[in-house]
Amino acid sequence: MPHFATEESLVHVAIAAEELFHIGPFVVTNSMVGVLIATVLLLSAAIWVSRNASTVPSRLQGILEFPVEFMANIVRSQSGDRWRAVLPLILTIFLLVLIANWVGLLPGVGTISINYTDAEGHTAAHPLIRPASADLNFTLALAVIAFVGFVTWGIRANGLGGYLKETFVANPAYMTPIMTPIHIVSEFSRLISLSMRLFGNVFAGEVLLAVMLALTFAVIPAIFLGLELVFGFVQALVFALLTMTYITLAMAGHGGGHDEEHDAPHHDADDAGLSENYAAAGSNRP
Amino acid sequence: MDLTPLAAGLAIGLGALGPGIGLGLGVSKAMEALGRNPEASGAIFVPYVLGIALTEAIGIYALVIGLLILFV
């Protein structure tokens, strides 16, 4: 059954990922196809490097090493002694989000559709591929991984008692009833802001591209494709850097609730820890 | 008369005002710092990106509210 776009509005906007088919009770959505493509790309790059790596890197190896070195330098300069243990998580998040964002810019993504018939027998054209970051499930899952990451690092660095004390007991003890709820809310607001930021940016980018493709012609959408290339990189970097900062703060102690809403002694300690790291990063410069 | 699209437009339009001003302030200060001390670009980069991201998050919240008004 052919699908006529003229019956609907000019731009097709779906806020949730659309279903493609079922495998038993398991629903496969188009954002899963997107993240699968990103995973295959990353895995084949990793396999290629592990087979063909040489001391004098070839041109392709140099390209593949560049993002790894880039993130390794940032993490080394920011997160203190244990940067080697923190790096794999940060690097994985960065590379996956980066590739998942850029998959959305490939030709055919969002334009190639397949017909989907739902339980009531309605048939609609659903795009075959959707960039994974334009699905809140993906970004929320990443944010949960990051959340588990920085809680685990806080417990590992300060001990379970130390971590609970940081989170649930305020510095002047009589402030505890006021500060503890704020600490808990600020911990969980990180989860929401991490996931919503990535989702909002990539989804808004997709809508922007669709609108520009529908309204303009010739080379004008290409300008926005170029912009989205930059935004995809920046958002991947932001997600990875925020995860790194949260982990660093959790490891440094005084980790719970470093955001703007808390008492002065905590604040000073956090700032001192951060600025020491930043000073260390800049001190080897002339 | 359905005012829902107007509400969504106002949500993102007004919600983008504050982050727009904030981003402008942040970027201008970072550029000033770079102009004074170009060697410090490496040290400025990470706090700059983090600050920009936290500022921009407010605009994204407005976008999410706009989407919620439109679709939910």
Image: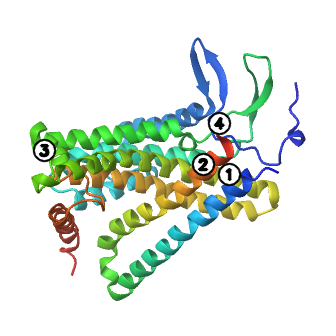
Amino acid type indicated by mark 4: Ile
Mark 4 highlights which residue? A129
Q: Secondary structure at mark 2?
A: helix
Number of the front mark, 4 or 1: 1
Of pointers 2 and 4, the one earlier in the residue sequence: 4
Identify the secondary structure beneath mark 1. Answer: helix
Q: CA distance from mark 2 to mark 4?
A: 14 Å
Tell me the subunit letter for badge 2: A
Q: Residues within 10 Å of mark 3 (few under 14, many from 20)?
A: some
- Sequence order check, earlier mark of 4 and 1: 4
Q: Position of residue A117 (x, y in %)?
A: 76, 20
- In which quadrant of the rendered view does residue B48 lie? bottom left
Say which chain tag 3 marks: A
Residue A129 in picture, x, y percent from top left: 65, 36
Mark 1 Cα shell of 10 Å, populated few (<14), some (14-19), many (≥20): some
- Alpha-carbon distance for marks 2 and 3? 39 Å
Query: Would you identify the image quadrant in which residue A222 lies?
Result: bottom right
Mark 1–mark 2 CB contact (< 8 Å)? yes
Mark-to-mark CA distance, 1 and 2: 6 Å
CA distance separating discs 3 and 1: 45 Å
In the visual, does A130 lie left or right of A79? right
Which residue is denoted by mark 3 in the rendering? A165
The amino acid sitting under disc 2 is Phe
Query: Quick check: A103 left or right of B45?
Result: right
Q: Position of residue A280 (x, y in %)?
A: 17, 68
Q: Nearer the viewer, residue A108 or B35?
A: B35
Dot 2 corresponds to which residue? Answer: A203
Residue that numbered label 1 is attached to? A207
> Secondary structure under badge 3?
helix
Specify the quadrant that holds the N terminus of chain A: top right
